[in-house]
Image (cartoon, rainbow, N blue to C red):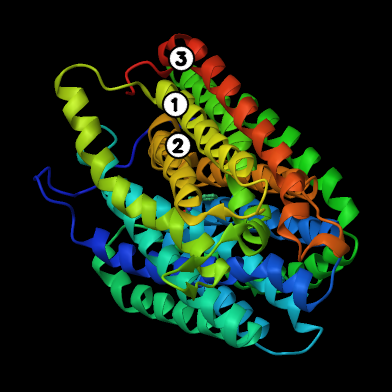
């Protein structure tokens, strides 16, 4: 099996970026607006409006987010094998739009169905739009990393605006208006991609049109079978939400399968390519832990922000959900400039950390960030409210961590994987965050606060402080371990930097 032949993109090796990057930038920006706008509301909506008890809220949030990032594996495979990236992105965008609009319907049934549509849609949209960015550059094109950084900026501008606006509308006006606002922007993202995709020319087209049209099942073409089969998954996901305990087995089973799959593929390849996949595998496994800690942001830290952060600025009480969901992407936007300058500057001096080293640093930063939250808790035991300044400062470090892992990881996957399975590997990269999200739900539920103290900051604070402290310590420990393992992983990476 020949898995090593790279696709040669036609992008000229000029200094600027291919103009298609900006189309992908805006499509992804609006998609992320809706995605993060909705996610900002999710846990608080379940706990305060639907009156789920907290452990159940965390379990559903964890399951939702885990499934959201599990489906990209399937969406990635479907795109590699059949649909091509473009059709996959369009199909995914349509499902996500429907999902967000369904959530806006103020009926009981709509909640699980809306989430299920978003889960399936995201599976087709998210990995494949990232892979499209990868097709704009050759593997060793020095612009590739910075192309991904620009793309990452789009993600975060969308996330910041989405968190800010949907958080405000949802928390202060109506949950369903918040969800609806998210839906409108998803449709905008879809429209951008629909009209912009022609500029991609041959990139992301189906690998073989004939296969797509071939009747697969009672005369129905393969393409249609893929769409219909995906729609059939939706009620299955709704059933899963009703039986969320089953998720433990699913996530564990799929985790083991993905590791086995990467090992299987790697043993079919010649040595250099095999070791590259080993390197990718180890880094991917570590990334699950990163996301498990990091994603407290969309979970426990939403409730923490509502209960235990002093949101008054100049006498005005800011909506906690907006603040908590605006801060991280806003830091990403600011700090992206710093990192975009820092890496090349270090590179020129021969001091740029290797990819594994950056992964290690990401954990160290994340740990420091949580430690700052913890110090805030310690200093405010008497009021139960940590200052907004401390809250923002903690996120500063957490986001330094994110910027050492997330854009680097996307780029690493496209570089270390053989071209023909990039979509699939991108899917596995997202799946690692799925496991992380699931873990995050479990960690979050350790911070469940009993009903009778939710309105008493002094009493709710200790429920958070202890776990936050532990996250900080574990994270720093893991970071140090990774830094020590760095040289071995680098060797496996061969000529890839
Ligand atoms: N926040 C980034 C995004 O939405 C990175 C990310 C991806 C984070 C997947 C967690 C999971 O693309």
Given contact means CB atoms under 8 Å apart, are the residues at marks 2 and 1 in contact?
yes
On the picture, is 172 further left or further right than 404?
Answer: right
Front residue (pair 119, 390):
390
Nearer to us of marks 1 and 3 is: 1
Find disc 3 in the rendering and name its residue. Answer: 486
Given contact means CB atoms under 8 Å apart, are the residues at marks 2 and 3 in contact?
no
Residue 361's disc is 1
**Residue drawn at (49%, 27%) of the image:** 364
Find disc 2 in the rendering and name its residue. Answer: 401
| Residue 57 percent location from the top left of the image | 79, 62
**Mark 2 packing: few (<14 Cα in 10 Å), some, or many (20+)?**
many
Q: Quadrant of residue 474?
A: top right
Q: Find the residue positioned furthest to the left.
A: 14
On the picture, is 273 further left or further right than 474?
Answer: left
The residues bearing labels 2 and 3 have C-alpha atoms spaced at a distance of 17 Å
Q: Quadrant of residue 64?
A: bottom right
Numbered disc 3: secondary structure:
helix
**Residue drawn at (42%, 11%) of the image:** 491
Front residue (pair 399, 483):
399
Is the CB of the residue bearing disc 3 within 8 angstroms of ligand 1?
A: no
On the picture, is 221 further left or further right than 454?
Answer: left
| Residue 302 percent location from the top left of the image | 63, 60
| Residue 170 percent location from the top left of the image | 59, 80
Nearer to us of marks 2 and 3 is: 2
Examine the rendered structure and indicate whether residue 333 appears above or below residue 278.
below
Numbered disc 1: secondary structure:
helix
Q: Which callout, 1 or 3, points at the residue further toward the start of the chain? A: 1
Front residue (pair 59, 21):
59
Q: Is residue 137 visible?
A: no
The residues bearing labels 1 and 3 have C-alpha atoms spaced at a distance of 11 Å
Residue 350's disc is none
């Amino acid at each position: 099996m020949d898995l090593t032949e790279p696709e040669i993109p036609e992008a000229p090796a000029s200094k600027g970026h291919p103009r298609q990057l900006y189309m992908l930038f805006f499509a992804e920006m609006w998609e992320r607006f809706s995605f993060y706008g909705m996610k900002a509301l999710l846990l608080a909506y379940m706990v305060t409006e639907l009156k789920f008890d907290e452990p159940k809220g965390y379990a559903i949030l964890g399951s939702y987010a885990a499934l959201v990032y599990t489906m990209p594996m399937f969406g990635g495979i479907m795109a590699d094998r059949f649909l091509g990236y473009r059709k996959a992105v369009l199909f995914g965008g349509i499902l996500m739009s429907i999902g967000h609009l369904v959530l806006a319907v103020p009926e009981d049934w709509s909640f699980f169905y809306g989430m299920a549509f978003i889960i399936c849609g995201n599976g087709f949209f998210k990995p494949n739009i990232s892979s499209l960015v990868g097709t704009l550059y050759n593997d060793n094109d020095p612009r590739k990393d910075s192309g991904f950084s620009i793309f990452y900026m789009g993600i975060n501008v969308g996330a910041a605006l989405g968190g800010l606006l949907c958080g405000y509308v949802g928390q202060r006006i109506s949950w369903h208006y918040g969800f609806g606002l998210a839906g409108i922007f998803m449709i905008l993202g879809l429209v951008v991609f629909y009209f912009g995709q022609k500029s991609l020319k041959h990139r992301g087209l189906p690998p073989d049109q004939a296969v797509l049209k071939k009747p697969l099942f009672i005369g129905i073409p393969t393409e249609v079978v893929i769409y219909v089969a995906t729609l059939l998954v939706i009620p299955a996901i709704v059933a899963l939400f009703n039986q969320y305990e089953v998720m433990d087995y699913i996530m564990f089973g799929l985790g083991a399968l993905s590791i086995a799959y990467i090992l299987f593929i790697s043993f079919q390849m010649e040595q250099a390519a095999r070791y590259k996949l080993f390197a990718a595998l180890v880094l991917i496994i570590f990334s699950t832990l990163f996301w498990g800690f990091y994603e407290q942001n969309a979970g426990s830290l939403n409730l923490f922000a509502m209960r235990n952060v002093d949101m008054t600025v100049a006498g005005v009480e800011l909506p906690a959900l907006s603040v908590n969901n605006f801060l991280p992407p806003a830091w990403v936007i600011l700090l992206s400039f710093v990192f975009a300058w820092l890496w090349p500057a270090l590179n020129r001096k021969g001091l740029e950390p290797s990819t594994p080293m950056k992964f290690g640093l990401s954990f160290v930063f994340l740990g420091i960030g949580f430690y700052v939250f913890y110090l805030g808790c310690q200093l405010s035991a008497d009021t139960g409210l940590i200052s907004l300044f401390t809250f923002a400062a903690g996120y500063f470090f957490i986001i330094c961590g994110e910027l050492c892992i997330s854009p680097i990881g996307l780029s690493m996957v496209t570089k270390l994987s053989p071209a023909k399975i990039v979509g699939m590997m991108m899917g596995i990269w997202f799946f690692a965050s799925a496991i992380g999200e699931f873990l995050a739900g479990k960690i979050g539920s350790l911070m469940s606060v009993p009903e009778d103290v939710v309105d008493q900051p002094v009493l709710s604070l200790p429920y958070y402080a202890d776990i936050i402290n532990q996250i900080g310590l574990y994270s720093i420990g893991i970071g140090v371990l990774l830094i020590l393992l760095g040289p071995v992983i680098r060797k496996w990476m061969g000529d890839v930097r």
